[in-house]
Amino acid sequence: MRTRAEADVVVCGGGTAGAVAAIASARTGARTLLVDQYGRVGGMASAGMSFLGVSDAGGRRALGGIGAELFERLEAIGAAFADRPDRQVGSVTVADPLALQHVLLTMLVEAGVQFLLHAFCADVLMEGRRVRGIVVADKAGIELVRARAIVDATGDGDIAARAGARFVLGRDRDGVMQPATRIFRMAGVDVEAMFAYLREHPEEMDVPERWDGSGYTAEDLRHTSVVMDAFPGLVAQARATGELTVPRDRIGIETGPVPGVVTINATRVHGVDGTDPEAVSRAEIETQRQMFEVSQFLRRRVPGFERAWLLDAAYQIGIRETRHILGEYVLTLDDVLAGRDFPDTVARGAYPVDLHDVHAGAEVLGRAVGGGGVTLRRIERAYGIPFRCLVPADVDGVAVAGRAISATHEAAGSVRGQAVCMATGHAAGTIAALSAKRDIVPRSLSVASIQQVLAAQRAILFAGSVPP
Ligand SMILES: Cc1cc2nc3c(=O)[nH]c(=O)nc-3n(C[C@H](O)[C@H](O)[C@H](O)COP(=O)(O)OP(=O)(O)OC[C@H]3O[C@@H](n4cnc5c(N)ncnc54)[C@H](O)[C@@H]3O)c2cc1C
């Protein structure tokens, strides 16, 4: 097999976690190659959703380092407003998705990262239990990319799984996974008219039953720009008449820095295994149908949308959950809700535990759900994420970043948040670079050496950045 490239660190996946991991790795002094199946970076974070829980409900910052720098650079060009407090989700940071991709790309280039785009990571090169490279399928055929260390930031844990790492697909006891959703954006929305309607109809913005926290006013929502789950009455009417067939009780709408443009989170397909190509193909088609249906519903029924049009759709269906790669520690719901710290903390999280109904009649956090809702648990105090959650228990040479790190289904409901993925990306990139430089496997690194480098790069590891 032809060798395409060699690098100290190869980051597989240039999404939410992977782009940050590659910047971290290069800044830590490793020759870094970023590989992605598409010609872009930013992953799901570039689909237009806001970053929830950059700070916890107590007002403590959880994301520092490269993620914080990204927001500072976006704010400096008027493309983001950062970290507005919110009762349910800690805080809301909103960024224009195209500016976000541009600034991330700029930071990658400045850091000296090399790129191999339009290359799918299909297999691994093993030496015993250590991964020594990846096999990519690209326009030139099937090629080898050799590496001293690898960051698996594919979201699905593709690399670790190919290498033989054990994982849990979805929920441990029954294998169910969170539903899939295509995010899309609409332009030409009269946002003021929408807020005026909500002011007159507070029942259309009340806090859903399975959420922590108290109600919003229209002014709260204008301030954070996120109308998290709204219009239950209008949706119920449209579902009753068959105008709306999407299995969702409410519509998520985010108004961003671009006037008249909103992001819509409303499509839903249950039972999609994001690692099964046929299931993903079916869900891609169904969510594209739903996207059009929801946009027509909004135009017809929701004040402010009368002259709105579909602007664009996320580059692919959004998969909330697939593999959880097993590390030497599995983060639990209790860890997350208790704001637990660990001696080997390498990142922090404060995104709420956000569990979309896995299917009608299923049980979520001890309650039967109808299929159309969301369970949301607030994070009072940000929690630590141990180094042990980023290193597969039975494979060497790989650090995992993003939504596939070692966590239970429930804890992953928080770990999957964009700010948390950026924090684990920063940690995994640093871990891979340090292990490549010292030519040892990640698990042999001293925790202190990782924490020292991360702290020097302004990552927040402990509440107030003071080790426990
Ligand atoms: C519908 C939906 C709504 C959400 N809403 C919010 C929200 O409002 N706020 C929030 O904070 N979070 C939200 N989330 C969660 C969050 O967006 C994601 O969990 C997070 O962005 C995942 O980051 P990641 O880096 O793990 O994966 P991704 O960002 O998906 O990145 C994975 C990258 O790897 C690449 N890749 C994958 N496999 C391969 C391969 N084999 N070879 C090469 N490249 C590969 C992909 O192209 C992609 O670039 C939402 C998620 C979904 C699905």
Image: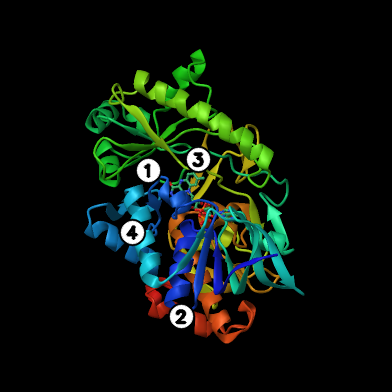
Instruction: Give the distance between the C-alpha atoms of the residues marked 3 and 4, in whole angstroms.
Output: 37 Å
Q: Taking 437 as reference, is 33 above or below it?
A: above
**Disc 2 marks which amino acid?**
Gly
**Disc 3 marks which amino acid?**
Arg
Q: Which residue is mark 4?
A: 103
* Pair 1/2: label in front: 2
Which quarter of the figure has residue 137? bottom right
Q: Taking 466 as reference, is 54 above or below it?
A: above
Q: Taking 281 as reference, is 236 above or below it?
A: above
Q: Which residue is mark 1?
A: 214
Q: Does the numbered disc 2 mark a residue whose Cβ is under 8 Å from ligand 1?
A: no
User: From this viewpoint, is residue 352 visible?
Assistant: no
Between residue 323 and residue 330, name the one nearer to us.
323
Q: Earlier in the sequence, mark 1 or mark 2?
A: 2
Q: Which residue is mark 2?
A: 29
Q: Earlier in the sequence, mark 3 or mark 4?
A: 4
**Disc 1 marks which amino acid?**
Ser
Instruction: Give the distance between the C-alpha atoms of the residues marked 4 and 2, in whole angstroms.
Output: 21 Å
Q: Which residue is mark 3?
A: 210
* Pair 3/4: label in front: 4
Which quarter of the figure has residue 358? top right
**Furthest-top residue in view?**
241
User: From this viewpoint, is residue 222 visible?
Assistant: yes
Residue 335 lies left or right of residue 39; in this view the side is: right
